[in-house]
């Protein structure tokens, strides 16, 4: 279900590319050059950064892979709800048909191209967690990049040796 459409797959590749770029930029261009002079500081930043990076990616993948929930269970048929005009499944309140996924979704919020999935009853919490972790990850990177650049301006930084 997580490959709803080709456009969503392109958005997933874009998000992965951005995460790879921020990972490379922060680790290789910001933290590793100060490792020799500020080892404990750099190691603590690396630990926190990797923890936030892992939590963000785990929530993103889980939001992508978790089905948002659909009204296919027998209980919905027995309760006499209206049927969807497009897919003929029962349509309880707040159920909407997603034209991208071509299915009805319980408590549908929206279809998110960045997870290539609908946000609904079963994956709403993990989607919100993903957004929170992503914001904390972004803010962490911004703050510590600013601190590192103020500690070691680019004109006095030593490049990382790649032997």
Image: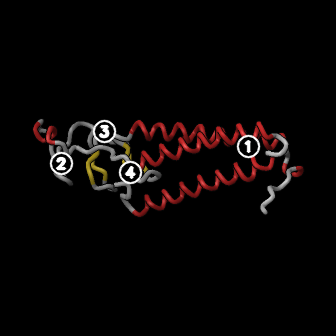
Measure the alpha-carbon separation of dots 1 and 4: 32 Å
92 relative position to 61: left or right: left
Earlier sequence position, callout 3 versus callout 1: 3
Sooner in the amino-acid sequence: mark 2 or mark 1: 2
- Crowding near pointer 3: few (<14 within 10 Å), some, many (20+)? some
Rendered location of residue 96, percent (x, y):
27, 45
Q: Quadrant of the C terminus?
A: bottom right
Q: Which labelled disc corresponds to residue 117?
A: 4
Q: Nearer the viewer, mark 4 or mark 3?
A: 4
SS under mark 3: loop
For numbered disc 4, what is the local secondary structure?
Answer: strand
Picture residue at 20% right of the left edge, 42% below the top? 91
Circle 2 sits on which residue?
A: 89
Answer with mark 3 or mark 2, whichever residue precedes in sequence. Answer: 2
Q: Residue furthest right?
A: 156
Q: Residue at x 84, y 40 (%)?
A: 151
Residue bearing mark 3: 107
Mark with earlier residue (1, 4): 4
The one nearer the camera, 35 or 159, is 35
Q: Which mark is residue 145?
A: 1
Task: Give the alpha-carbon distance from disc 4 to disc 3, as whole Å.
Answer: 14 Å
- The residue drawn where x is 79% and y is 40% is 39
Going 31% across and 51% down the picture, which residue do you hit?
A: 98
Q: Earlier in the sequence, mark 2 or mark 4?
A: 2
């Amino acid at each position: 279900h997580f490959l709803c459409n080709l456009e969503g797959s392109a958005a997933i590749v874009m998000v992965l590319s951005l995460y790879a770029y921020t990972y490379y930029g922060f680790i290789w261009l910001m933290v590793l050059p100060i490792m020799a002079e500020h080892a404990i500081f750099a190691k603590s930043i690396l630990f926190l950064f990797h923890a936030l990076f892992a939590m963000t990616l785990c929530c993103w993948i889980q939001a992508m892979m978790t089905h948002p929930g659909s009204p296919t269970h027998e209980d919905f048929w027995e309760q006499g709800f209206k049927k969807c005009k497009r897919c003929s499944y029962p349509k309880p309140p707040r159920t909407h048909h997603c034209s991208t996924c071509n299915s009805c979704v319980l408590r549908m919020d929206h279809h998110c191209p960045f997870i290539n999935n609908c946000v609904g009853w079963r994956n709403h919490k993990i989607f919100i967690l993903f957004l929170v972790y992503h914001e904390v990850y972004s803010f962490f990177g911004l703050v510590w990049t600013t601190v590192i650049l103020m500690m070691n301006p680019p004109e006095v930084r030593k490049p990382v040796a790649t032997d």
